[in-house]
Image: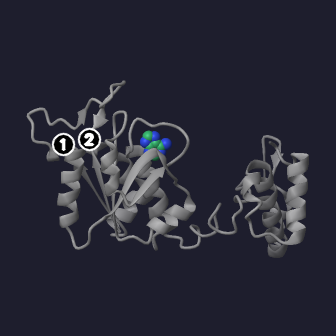
Amino acid sequence: MIFEALSVFPEVFSPYLDASILGRAQRAGIFSFEAHDLRDWTHDRHRTVDDAPFGGGQGMLMKPAPIFEALDDLSARGEKPPHVVFFSPCGERFDQRVAERLSREERILFVCGRYEGIDERVYTLADDVLSIGDYVLTGGELAAMVVIDAVVRLLPGALGDELSAVDESFSQAGLLEYAQYTRPASYRGMDVPEVLLSGDHARVDAWRRSNAIERTALWRPDLIETAPLSDEERARALGIIAQGKGEGERR
Ligand code: ADE
């Protein structure tokens, strides 16, 4: 997978993308990343990428020309034109389903806006406009790294352990993940549920399923409607939602 970003701060990506699991995945050839400096497509001495909005108002907007010219150039490079992703709080909400869809692309170019916004005509270049949540960031760079992180861990081999990408919140059965514990079995008066120490795999599986349903009903009741549950499980989840608590929950 090839990722590229177009940004006026191309240096902000590598501290995160070169570290830990993502760094290892890059070195293993699972993905590559290149940041392009948008100012390379300006023609004035000050390398200007922004201008005041028509109609007046606060702040500056990204000008169309550097972005259009950059995309002309970058699309002509390489074997395949990139899938072009823009970021905006007005975009489609980024979630695990979108991450899975993007993980099937070969080359993705993220256009990272700064300032108060981008000239509206630039969005005609977008294959996707994504929002990572209902809050406003100062630019698209963090959003691009959020998307890269979520997509890379879906690529074969990226996590080392092939199973861990599947059995997690949202990916598997539309439920939040069950609670997990490691040693010690008792810590500051808090005990690991007895069943997890039993070595009885069938009982452990049943407890995990039940715990995942309980936590989802408590913390993300909106997911219960679409989660694939048996009639019995759904009735229990709806009971927890109505009561506002589950057995032994701390929140
Ligand atoms: N740019 C500014 N805010 C954003 C957000 N919430 N998601 C994606 N891009 C953004």
Q: Classify 73 as above or below 40.
A: below
Q: Classify 109 as above or below 141.
A: below
Question: Residue 14, which numbered label?
Answer: none
Q: Which residue lies furthest to the front in this view?
A: 55
Provide residue 170's location: percent of width, then percent of height. 64, 62
Decide which of 158, 184 is in the foreground and name it.
Answer: 158
Provide residue 107's location: percent of width, then percent of height. 33, 67
- Inspect this view and state whether residue 90 appears: yes
Please state which amino acid type lies under the numbered disc 2: Val
Q: State the image quarter where residue 237 is shown.
A: bottom right
The yes-or-no answer for disc 2 within 8 Å of ligand 1 is no
Dot placed on the residue nearer the N-terminal end, 1 or 2: 2
Using residue 232 as the reference point, say whether residue 87 is left or right of it.
left
Question: Which image quarter holds the N terminus?
Answer: bottom left
Badge 1 density bin: few <14, some 14–19, many ≥20, Cα 10 Å: some
Using residue 236 as the reference point, say whether residue 13 is left or right of it.
left
Residue at 39 percent of width and 48 percent of height: 16
Badge 2 density bin: few <14, some 14–19, many ≥20, Cα 10 Å: some
Asked whether disc 1 touches disc 2, contact meaning CB atoms under 8 Å apart, the reply is yes
Q: Tell me the quadrant of ligand 1.
A: top left
Q: State the image quarter where residue 115 is shown.
A: top left
Please state which amino acid type lies under the numbered disc 1: Arg
Question: Which image quarter holds the C terminus?
Answer: top right
Using residue 158 as the reference point, say whether residue 38 is left or right of it.
left
Q: What element carries label 2?
A: loop
Q: Name the residue under label 2.
A: 8
How far apart marks 1 and 2 lie (CA) works out to 7 Å
Q: State the image quarter where residue 173 is shown.
A: bottom right
Decide which of 119, 12 is in the foreground and name it.
Answer: 119
Q: Name the residue under label 1.
A: 39
